[in-house]
Image (cartoon, rainbow, N blue to C red):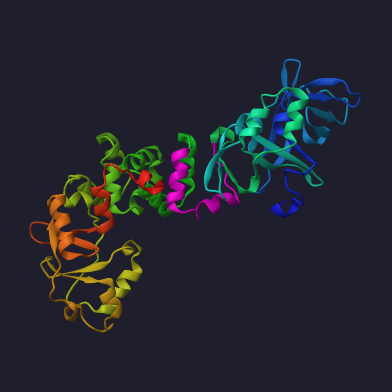
Amino acid sequence: MTGGDLTTPPATDPALVAVTTLVRGRVVNPAGDEVGRVVDVVVRWDEEPYPALTGMIVKVGGRRAFVPVDAIERLSPRLVELGSARVFLEEYERRDGEVLLAEDVLDHQLVDVSGARVVRAADLYLAVLPTGTRLVAVDVGLKALARRMVPGRRAARAAARPDAVLDWAAVQHFTGPEGRVRLRESGARLQKLRPDQLADLLDDLGRSERRWLLAQLDAEVAADVLEEAPPSRAAELLEEALPEHAAAMLLAMEPDEAAEALREVDESTRRRLLGSLEVEDADRLGALVRFSAKTAGGHMTSRLVLARLEDTVAGVRDQLRADPDTTGLDAIVVVGDDGRLIDDISMLELLVADPDAPLATLTGPPYPLVVRVDAELGEVVERFIDQRGSSIVVVDDDRRPVGRILADDLVDALVPVLDRGERRRA
């Protein structure tokens, strides 16, 4: 079944039945005799956008018996009619892929992917279709919560007038057996949300939902989300993540952003997170973490493109195209045979230069302003004002380039009273 099979809006479709009107409803045999009361509604998560009803959990005597969907003749508010007089006594045991709508979904957090917001399931709607009965919609309105306090038939009548209904295919749900996330097409659409939208969603989710949502994102997308979050929240998310996912996110983050988050965790957690990386990557990030946040080294990215005077413009362009980690850099660094800084050449200069020209023809005054790795932030600000550029090169005591500070990183460093989440919402 696809979204196109729903030919009428959920709010006006007479075949819709609210889950809240089924739970605690009567289950009767063909003679009209009550055999039990509905405890829960069972559906199966699968690749379909609308989960299929597999049956009901019914309290029969002292048992929670399972009534399969093919034994149900008709569903209506407060009433489930069976097709035979058979009494079901087999105790219900959850099978793989089955979800209990009242226990697992009702009142739980969901993500409205289309609206990029966290919502809570106040009611759920089943559609009785020729192809079977399926979960097709969720009501997230306050009126749906209020009507559940109304007893009996009045509640059933109110449920027939949904308040704020979302198509289930547009919802990302986190609940299910063992709390596992079940992603369908809406999961792919999560990847397309902006990092700031995803960061806002994470702020509004509970811990388990937050952890699972982040785990489903590509490492590059997740890294962008962490960079949108305040360092303390980014650190929390890294702590909660599985080791391999934490490692992938750290590597995908800008080094200065990753180091900033790692400074927020305790020493043992930092060792654990760094231990999930390859030795070379761990050493590189560990070196950044050791710099004080009050110095240039504490806010620089260690991603640099180093080139020699004899390298050609075409050769450097090829190097940039081959290395995705260079995205976002505004210049390359030219060094001598001793590794010391000679010049800083902007990407614009490289773009317009003769491809066959050696870099030596592009170097010369005005030479770049630099700061030492232990320079105080005040000095860094002065250098930026003097240069009026978009970045500044950071060097060690021997004038060897060790990093670069971008203008936006400096802004982050100078506005500590407003975390990124607050600025994002402003």
Total marks shown come to 0
The residue closer to the viewer here, 187 or 242, is 187
Q: In terms of image quadrants, where is residue 162?
A: top right
Q: Is residue 337 left or right of 252 when viewed as pictured?
A: left
Q: Is residue 408 left or right of 182 when viewed as pictured?
A: left
The residue closer to the viewer here, 124 or 277, is 124
Q: Position of residue 286 (x, y in %)?
A: 23, 46
Q: Residue furthest right?
A: 31
Q: Position of residue 219 (x, y in %)?
A: 42, 52
- Residue 206 visible from this viewpoint: yes
Residue at the spot 20% in from the left edge and 49% down from the top edge: 298
Which residues make up the magenta segment? 180-204
Residue at the spot 72% in from the left edge and 44% down from the top edge: 10
Q: In terms of image quadrants, where is residue 260?
A: top left
Q: Position of residue 361 (x, y in %)?
A: 17, 81
Q: Residue furthest top?
A: 62
Residue at the spot 82% in from the left edge and 20% down from the top edge: 35
Q: Position of residue 408 (x, y in %)?
A: 28, 56
The residue closer to the viewer here, 252 or 150, is 150
Q: In terms of image quadrants, where is residue 92?
A: top right
Residue 118 is covered by the magenta coloring: no
Q: Is residue 298 left or right of 324 when viewed as pictured?
A: left
